[in-house]
Amino acid sequence: MNITADQVKKLRESTGAGMMDCKKALEKSDGDVEKAISYLREQGIAKATQKASRVAKDGLIYSQIYSNDRLGVLLELNCETDFVARTEDFKQLSKEITNWIIEHRPKDIQQVIESLKDRLNQAIAKIGENITVKRFALLELNPQSQGLIHNYIHPGDKLGVLVELKCQVEENAQNSEFKLLAKDVSMQIAATNPLVVKRDKLEPEIIEKEKDIYRTQAKNEGKPEKILDRIVEGKLEKYFQEVCLLEQPFVKDQDRSVKERIDEIQKKLSEEITVGEFARFRLGDETS
């Protein structure tokens, strides 16, 4: 059967497959487009399976905000090269996955991977690299709460943050000062990678481990036993300033803390403002 260039073009546009693959698929399907699509999907899945063992160490951090700033998703999608990570096809796939997460509210990453297996295989066949969905975070304001979900993606798409900033008055959630604060907090998290918002959220085991380390350090330095507790408490305070968001020096003004920056906006708006949950993804990290 004579396969025309127009047939090949249409099949290529609908599948994203290569020109020669499309021509071969049409020849094997006697020009039947639907059969040709099925053939390409079958071949694509076979190719995707072969690529699945290759390491996907590059990729991007992607985020979207929904429902009038009350809902947000942060995603890490991996591929093999930075070249592919920068393509529109890869970015579009990231968008599709975040939309699917919003619609289906998966309980974990395995549910995402299993449910989107066919779509990922199609993308692998088209792009030519292994692609893996590594992790996602979904933050949503409680229906009774006011505030917003804000996202920040650092230039280059390799680092991203999703944060919940809460207030009491609905109108304040759209105030420019409140939105700027949300941006400042998200950029602070991106720059400093805090463990928790405030110290009472730290696991007791973590604090005890730090105390043991500081006590051992002081003993090794020959410090007198009677001042060990004071030394440990002093170092612990410095630790809190490093890992607790509210106690960190504000990156835009090192002479004050993040809490003091928040207090400034609270006074302006006559409002109580709290930082809720947050997620921070850096490409390639095992944890956020």
Image (spheres, grey):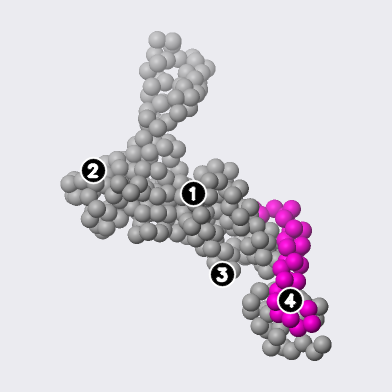
Q: Amino acid at mark 4?
A: Ala
Give me the disc on residue 263.
none
Mark 4 or 2, closer to the camera: 4
Residue type at mark 3 is: Glu
Mark 4 closeness class: few <14, some 14–19, many ≥20 residues within 10 Å: many
Which residue matches tag 1? 137
Q: Are marks 4 and 2 in contact (CB under 8 Å)?
A: no
Left or right of residue 278: residue 38: right
Identify residue for label 4: 36
Q: Position of residue 118 (x, y in %)?
A: 66, 61
For label 3, count other residues whose C-alpha is less than 10 Å away and answer few (under 14), some (14-19) or many (20+). few
**Magenta segment range?**
29-58
- The reply, left or right, for residue 271 in relation to residue 41 is left
Q: Which residue is mark 2?
A: 272
Quick check: can you spot residue 284?
no
Most prominent secondary structure in the magenta stretch? helix
The answer for how far apart the CA atoms under marks 4 and 3 are is 25 Å
In the rendered image, residue 262 lying in the magenta stretch gets the answer no
Q: Residue at x 42, y 31 (%)?
A: 202
Q: Residues within 10 Å of mark 1 (few under 14, many from 20)?
A: many
> Where 27 sits versus 135, above or below?
below
Q: Which residue is mark 3?
A: 88
Q: Is residue 54 magenta?
A: yes
- Kind of residue sitting beneath label 1: Ala
